[in-house]
Image (cartoon, rainbow, N blue to C red):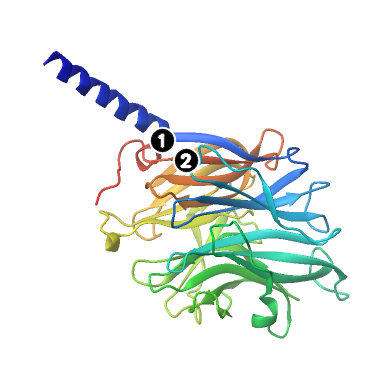
Amino acid sequence: MRIAISLNIVLCLCTLLIADEISFTKKPIFVGGLDDIVEYRIPAMVTTGTGTLIAICDARVDRPGDAINNVDIAMKRSKDFGRTWDPMRVIVDFPGEEAACDPCMVFDKQTDNLWIFYDHILAEPAKSGTRLREQRVAVLHAIQSQDGGDTWSPPRDITRIVQQAGWESIMAGPGSGTQTRDGHLLVPCYTRRTDNDYSQVLVSKDHGKSWKITNAARANTNEAAVVELNDGRWLFNMRDVHRNGYRLVSITADDGRRWETPWEETGLPGPCCQGSLIRYTDVRDGFNKNRLLFSNPADSSKRQNMTVRMSYDEGKTWPVAKLIDTSFCAYSCLTVLSDGTIGLLYEHGKESPYEQISFTRFDLQWLTDGTDRLEK
C-alpha cells in the first residue's frame, strides 16, 4: 500500500512538473550580432505535419534597416516543441544589396508542401515617381520545400502571374497564411499602387500550381492576416497605414471578390505594426469551442507590450488578453504545435524592438489563467 501511494505521488508530481514545463517557456532564437548577422527582423513560423517548427526571418547581414540593404532569408528548425533549434541556415541569398525580405509562410497539410513568399528587391532602380520606399524594382517570389525545409525549389516570380496595370509591386504578408478546409491556400499580401497600398489575398485552389489574387479589401492598408471562419467566410485583419490605433477588419463570403466595408476593431488596439491571426480550435474537429488567436504589440501608439488575445465567437469579441512581454516589441507570428500548445515568435528588446526574435510556448490554461482547457 505504501509503495502504491508513493508511486501515485510520484506520478502526480511528474504530471505537475510536465504541466509547469509547458505552461510558459521563452527562448531567444535569432539574436542580432550572432552568426555574422547584424539584425534579424520579420518573423514567420509554421508547424509541419510531422510536428517540426519552421522559423524564418530577415537576416540583415551588414547593417540594420530595411532594403536597400543586404538582406537574406534565415531559417531555424525545432523537432522538440521549441526546446532546441538547429543552427541557422540562410536559404535565400542574392548578391550585393539585392534583398530577400518580409517572408510569409504557409504549410499545405494535404501535400506536406511548405511555401515561402518574400519580396525580392532588385538593384535595378524603379521608375521615376514610384511610391516604392526602396526606389528599386520589387517582385514577389515564392519557393517551396517538399521535405520539411531540407531543400528548397528555385524562386518563382508570382508578380508576373497576378500583376495588373497600375500596380507598382506586390508585397508579401508578412507572417503566415492559412489553408481552408477545402484545401485552398490563402496568402495575405498587398499591392503597392501609385496612390495607396491595398490589402489582398493570394489564393491557390490547386496546391500552388496556379495562383490568383482577390480584389482589394481596403486602401491605405497592408501587412494583413487572414483566417477562415467556421461558416466558410474569410476574416481579414489589416494594418491601418493612417495609424488610428486599431486593426481594420473585413469579411468576404465569396472568396475575396467582394469585401464588407472594413471597420475598426476596438478590441484589437495597436500601433501601425504587423499582427498575427490564426485559428486555434474548431468545433467541427471535435473541440468543445471555436477559438481564434491574435498577437500584436497592444499599445495604441508605441511598439511595446506584446499581447496574445483569444476570441470564442469567430472574431466578434476578444475577451481573453494575456500580456507576453512589457518591453519594446513589434512583429510576431503564431502557430499551433502538434501537442495543442501555442507558439509565438516575436521581435523584442530592451532599447528597441529589433534586438532579437524569441520563441515562446504556452498552453491554453496559462493563456486563460486556468479558466479554459482543451477538450474534445
Q: Give the image location of residue 71, x and y in percent.
A: 77, 55
Say which element carries label 1: helix
Query: Image quadrant of residue 139?
Result: bottom right
Q: Is residue 342 visible?
A: yes
C-alpha separation, residue under disc 2 versus residue under disc 1: 7 Å
Task: Identify residue for label 1.
Answer: 22
Going by the numbered disc 2, the residue's amino acid type is: Arg
Residue at image position (40%, 50%) is: 338
Q: Is residue 207 left or right of residue 290?
A: right
Residue at image position (51%, 41%) is: 82
Q: Give the image location of residue 303, x and y in percent.
A: 64, 45
Q: Nearer the viewer, residue 93 or 3?
A: 3
Q: Are marks 2 and 1 in contact (CB under 8 Å)?
A: yes
The numbered dot on residue 325 is none
Residue at image position (52%, 77%) is: 204
Q: Give the image location of residue 312, x and y in percent.
A: 34, 54
Going by the numbered disc 1, the residue's amino acid type is: Ile
Task: Identify residue for label 2.
Answer: 361
Q: Give the image location of residue 45, x and y in percent.
A: 55, 53
Q: Nearer the viewer, residue 87 or 64?
A: 87
Q: Is residue 226 visible?
A: no
Q: Nearer the viewer, residue 157 or 175?
A: 157
